[in-house]
Amino acid sequence: MIDPSTLVAFLPAALALNLLPGSDMMFCLAQGLRGGPRPTIAASAGISAGAMVHVTAAGLGLGALVAAFPVLFGLIRWIGVAYLLWLAWRTLTTPITAADKPPVEPRRAFRDGLIVNLSNPKVVLFILAFVPQFVDPSLSILPQFLAFGAILAIGGFIVNGLVGIFAGGLGRQLLTNVRLERIVRFATATVFGALALRLARESRT
């Protein structure tokens, strides 16, 4: 069982991290502009599911393996870059034909969020740097990682989902105009491309 004082210290730190703009938030923002509330919620859920996979891997010690082998780190990272570029191209070349129907299925949005999160190896390294500060080594390690990870994942799901939903409402209003629809698609594709560039430039440090 996690000590209550440790939990009290962890919650505000986790909230601050969830509120900090990052790749996951930008991804949900782009999904909101592109597809509306339902795909946004699904994408946020996919990101949170990916985060839990990273947390489990870190708790099992697999994160140290990724950190120790640059080739493995680089392979995962470049898979993520390629996938984000594919999302950017698909968004740019696929017109939104109906303003009242989400152009992205929630199932696909969940998958995209999951893959984007899993293909960013810095997530597991971040977890290895942050979560152990609150872990009691005298207790079982994995359950503590899972508990702290669940808090981060749930908070991220709420924050990222709300950001995307707000963007989705704005995006739907813009889609009544063909010219603005193209601007929304271009802006969304640009976000995906920028995330790919950011991931491509990242290193383990």
Image: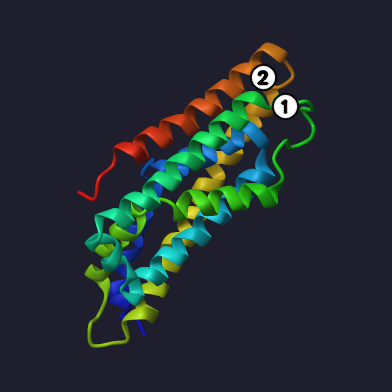
Residue at left 66%, top 45%?
A: 39
Q: Quadrant of residue 127?
A: bottom left
Determine if residue 107 is in view: yes
Q: Is residue 94 left or right of residue 25?
A: right
- Label 2: element kind: helix
| Distance (Cα) linking label 1 and label 2 | 7 Å
Q: Is residue 55 left or right of residue 66?
A: right
- Label 1: element kind: loop
Q: Is residue 122 left or right of residue 35?
A: left
CB atoms of marks 1 and 2 within 8 Å: yes
Residue at left 24%, top 80%?
A: 136
Residue at which label 2 appears: 181
Specify the quadrant that holds the N terminus: bottom left
Name the image colouring: rainbow
Q: Is residue 72 left or right of residue 25?
A: left
Determine if residue 16 is in view: no
Nearer to us in this view, 167 or 8: 167
Q: Is residue 99 above or below residue 121?
A: above
Question: Disc 2 marks which amino acid?
Answer: Glu
Question: Disc 1 marks which amino acid?
Answer: Ile
Q: Which mark is residue 96?
A: 1
Estimate how packed mark 1 is, as few (under 14), some (14 to 19) or many (20 or more) residues with alpha carbons within 10 Å.
Answer: some
Estimate how packed mark 2 is, as few (under 14), some (14 to 19) or many (20 or more) residues with alpha carbons within 10 Å.
Answer: many
Q: Which mark is residue 15?
A: none
Residue at left 54%, top 31%?
A: 88
Residue at left 67%, top 37%?
A: 36
Number of marks drawn: 2
Q: Position of residue 66 (x, y in %)?
A: 30, 62
